[in-house]
Image (cartoon, coloured by chain):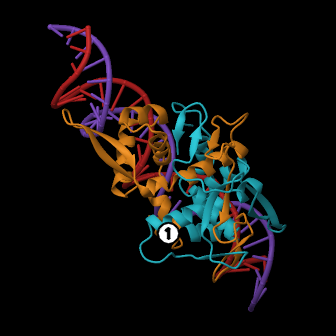
Chain colours: A orange, B cyan, C red, D purple
Amino acid sequence: MAAGGRDCSIANALGVIGERWSLLALREVLLGERRFDQIARNTGASRDILAARLRTLVARGVLTRQLYEQHPPRYEYVPTEAGQALAPILLALTDWGDRYVTDGPPPTRWEHDCGAELEPELVCRHCHAPVAAGTTRLLRLGRVF
Amino acid sequence: MAAGGRDCSIANALGVIGERWSLLALREVLLGERRFDQIARNTGASRDILAARLRTLVARGVLTRQLYEQHPPRYEYVPTEAGQALAPILLALTDWGDRYVTDGPPPTRWEHDCGAELEPELVCRHCHAPVAAGTTRLLRLGRVF
DNA sequence: GCAGCATGGTTGGAAAATCAAACTGACTAT
DNA sequence: ATAGTCAGTTTGATTTTCCAACCATGCTGC
């Protein structure tokens, strides 16, 4: 996909979820809106593009299509494990958007299981310290983000 | 941008960094490759599109353009605070790509300041428990991701 | 001075992706 | 019979993207 660039899992990931509308469609599915029309309405994507995006998300294992009605056959889109694993990334992106893009108060607010309002933070699974720009080294290439 | 869809900071964030090549350009800048030609080479983006992307990233406050040579005037692209705040998201995306997209071993491996190989994890800043699908509730709309 | 080189873009035309709206087909509800 | 729902597909016009080549600026060697 990014044929000329670095061999990199960011590029690979974006090959799956990086096209326009893909992440918004996934947002809807994770929010529980699993039917085509609802996803179309809530994202604003045109229906043909949405159909294409959902097809590739299914093909790449982020969503599955499940029959919820035989006659006529109707399918809904359900997140796979890979799809659910994107939930934290979407929450982190929400937080970033709240801070640096959205004017005014955050349009959505989240509560964590602990009862507090969610402020997501990326930490190292080993030392539990925050992972931020400059706390990380790319093995073989020197200090970076 | 997503005029028809939900009012949502994910959509707002994607309006800034969601276009093709934007995140790969940011990856390069965060990796320390701050010059146009290097970014073009390492991403594989065509030069005109890259110029447009860098312009919008600068306009939206993710990067700044800094003069590093007077004669001839030459600029390099440096991440702002907002740009650095995307570093954890890129690392999380790398992790997701490693797990669910990239075939074979991860193309990059990261070491955290603590000395361990980085396994990033999103946690709640308050209770320090992992934030995953199903541990979070959208205030006003019921349990979701 | 002048050719050649490097950097950081811009330009033009073809190819591909996107858009909104209409359409299809199989049903359901009144 | 008429209207409406749902999940797409088709259509035709508009936008974006891609690629290669070109341009502008200034520097370096001769």
Say left or right for B71 vs A113.
right
Q: Nearer the viewer, residue A19 or C29?
A: C29
Q: Is residue A75 above or below residue B3?
A: below
Quarter of the image where one finds residue C29: top left
Say left or right for D14 vs A47.
right
**Residue type, label 1:** Asp
CA neighbours of label 1 inside 10 A, class few (<14), some (14 to 19), many (20+): many
Which residue is outermost to the right?
Answer: B70
Q: Position of residue A45 (x, y in %)?
A: 45, 37
Q: Is residue B98 above or below residue B105?
A: above
Say left or right for A127 vs A82.
right
Task: Give the quadrant of the N terminus of chain B.
Answer: top right
Q: Position of residue A85 (x, y in %)?
A: 50, 56
Which residue is outermost to the front?
Answer: A114
Instruction: Check disc 1 and report its element: helix, strand or loop.
Output: helix
**Visible in this render: residue B130?**
yes
Residue annotated with mark 1: B98
Q: Position of residue A135 (x, y in %)?
A: 73, 70
**Visible in this render: residue A10?**
no
Q: Which of B86 and B129 is in front in this view?
A: B129
Say left or right for A42 vs A98.
left
Q: Position of residue B138 (x, y in %)?
A: 58, 37
Q: How many labels does the image show?
A: 1
Query: Which residue occupies 18% across, 33% down?
Result: A71
Q: In this view, does C1 lie above or below B70?
A: below
Query: Which residue occupies 63% across, 81% down?
Result: A139
Quarter of the image where one finds residue A101: top right
Q: Which of B21 and A104 is in front in this view?
A: A104
Mark 1, chain letter?
A: B
Query: Which residue occupies 71% across, 53% down?
Result: B125
Query: Which residue occupies 45% across, 53% down?
Result: A83
Quarter of the image where one finds residue A111: top right
